[in-house]
Structures are given as C-alpha cells and as structure tokens.
Amino acid sequence: MSETITIPVLNNRSDSSNNNDSDCGQCGKGGCCGGFGIKAGSEKDVVYRNIMLYAAMGLIIFTVTYLIKELLTALT
C-alpha cells in the first residue's frame, strides 16, 4: 500500500497584517494607495508627467503591434 506524505505549508502572513493600513504598505514598501503612480497630494507636474508617460507607452505599444502585424501579413 502507498503511504500518505504530509507536505508542510509555510504561512507567509505575519501577525501585523491585521492592521487597517496593510492595503497601502504591501507593494514594494512604497504603497499602492495611488493608482498609476499618482498618489493623493501629488503635485500637478507629477500627475501630468505620469499621464503623458502612460499615453506615450500606449502609443508605442500600439505602433509596434501594428508594425508587427503588417510585417507578418507581408511575409505570408
């Protein structure tokens, strides 16, 4: 007959995770309270810079995707 093997499970949660501020302190020590890197109290230039960076990244992604699509359709 086969034996049952028990695998120990590690619990990575600490006792301090019961605090209410645990939602804002877990993402790489900087916190996740602000969406897209924009946190409450950010200056306008920081907000505009982040929005422009995300718009530029989106434009680059769409452009590269379009070029790859055109390249693949040209090869077939």
Image: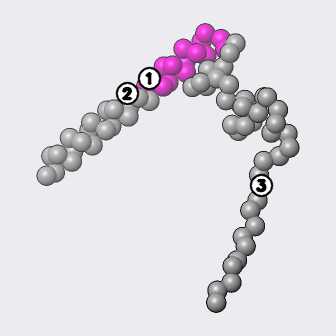
First in sequence, mark 3 or 2: give its number. 3
The residue positioned farthest toward the bottom in the image shown: 1
Closer-to-camera residue (66/2): 2
Q: Are marks 3 and 2 in contact (CB under 8 Å)?
A: no
* Residue in the picture at 20% in, 41% down: 70
Which stretch did the figure color magenta?
A: 42-56
First in sequence, mark 1 or 3: give its number. 3
> Which numbered dot is residue 55?
1
Q: CA distance from mark 3 to mark 2?
A: 42 Å
* Residue in the picture at 58% in, 15% down: 47
Give above or below for 34 relative to 27.
Answer: above
Residue with the mark numbered 3? 11
* Residue in the picture at 17% in, 46% down: 73
Q: Amino acid at mark 1?
A: Ala
> Magenta span has 5?
no
Q: Main secondary structure of the magenta part?
A: helix
> Which numbered dot is residue 59?
2
Quadrant of the rendering where the N terminus is positioned: bottom right
Answer with the quarter of the image where residue 66 lies. Answer: top left
Residue 55, position in %: x, y? 44, 23
Disc 2 crowd rating (10 Å Cα; few below 14, some 14-19, many 20+) is: few
Q: Nearer the viewer, mark 3 or mark 2?
A: 3
Answer with the quarter of the image where residue 35 lies. Answer: top right
Closer-to-camera residue (73/26): 26
